[in-house]
Image (tube, helix red, strand yellow):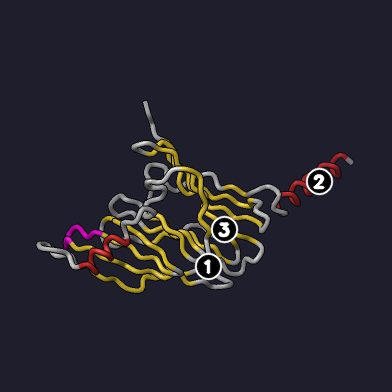
Amino acid sequence: MRRLVTLVALLGLLAILTDGQAPQTSSKPIFTDYPPYFCVGGGFVAMAGISPRDPLIVIPIDANGIEAPQTIPPVGDAVLGMQCSGSHIELLVNDYKSGRLIMPLYTVQEHRWDLPSIREEQREELNLPKSGPTPPAAEHKKDSFDWVGSRAGAHMRGDWYILVPQVVYRPNNTYEVHFVSTHGNTWDKLVVTLLEETLDKKVTRSVPLVHIEADHD
């Protein structure tokens, strides 16, 4: 009888967990030292570190919900900027050996019954003159990578959310990136979390992406 009661209790706990009443939480953030380049696309979140040779990290959201991060080998030596639009990710990368600025473009392709695939479509070079004025089109292209949201939480303070749009095959869930940032001249604390929520805004899964706390000692 005691074993039966224990089994019923365990089954009850399992039902609560699988019913979405208790959120699933991953424990270890991906970035803990510095704010990465960061952008939100259609059905994915992308991040790239600022250290030389850091890879591109893409977290897709598909029919199974939030997938494990996919790592894309780096192009060039150091990422200088990132932007997302629809199913595309574009980086601005410095190639130290050639002294060139390269813009690799990636596509995140959804597959209903398999993991999304991420492929590089093309690479372009951002041609900036070594002397004289920079053509307005080239200056605009460079500045587009430099906007205030290119780095996670850069120059922003407070508590805000960004919706992840165009998540297919998940009609009963929404996905948001939650930012909490407090800082003066430098970051005191920056926390970025990817949330899976029900339509009535109950959190069913929480995936930490960035967690940075300044050491004031």
- Look at mark 3 in the image and give the residue it sits on: 175
N-terminal-most mark, 3 or 2: 2
Name the amino acid, label 1.
Leu
| Residue 189, x across and y down, in percent | 44, 38
| Residue 22, x across and y down, in percent | 68, 47
Give the residue drawn at x 28%, y 65%: 141
Q: Does 159 appear in magenta? A: no
Q: Residue 10 lies in what quarter of the image? A: top right
Q: Gap between marks 1 and 3, in whole Å?
A: 18 Å
Give the residue drawn at x 86%, y 39%: 2
Give the residue drawn at x 51%, y 65%: 43
| Residue 125, x across and y down, in percent | 23, 69
Q: Report if the CB atoms under discs 2 and 1 are less than 8 Å apart.
A: no
- Mark 1 surroundings within 10 Å by alpha-carbon count, few (fewer than 14), some (14 through 19), many (20 or more): some
Name the secondary structure under disc 1: loop
Q: Is residue 63 left or right of residue 214?
A: right
Q: Is residue 9 left or right of residue 119?
A: right
Name the amino acid, label 3.
Tyr
- Look at mark 2 in the image and give the residue it sits on: 7
- Mark 3 surroundings within 10 Å by alpha-carbon count, few (fewer than 14), some (14 through 19), many (20 or more): many
Name the secondary structure under disc 3: strand
Q: Gap between marks 2 and 1, in whole Å?
A: 35 Å
Give the residue drawn at x 35%, y 59%: 82
Q: Is residue 89 left or right of residue 192?
A: left
Residue sitting nearer the eye, 145 or 213: 145
Name the amino acid, label 2.
Leu
Of discs 3 and 2, which sits in the foreground? 3
Looking at the rendering, the stretch of residues picked out in magenta corresponds to 94-99
- Look at mark 1 in the image and give the residue it sits on: 115
N-terminal-most mark, 2 or 1: 2
Of discs 1 and 3, which sits in the foreground? 3
Looking at the rendering, in which quadrant would you find the C terminus? top left
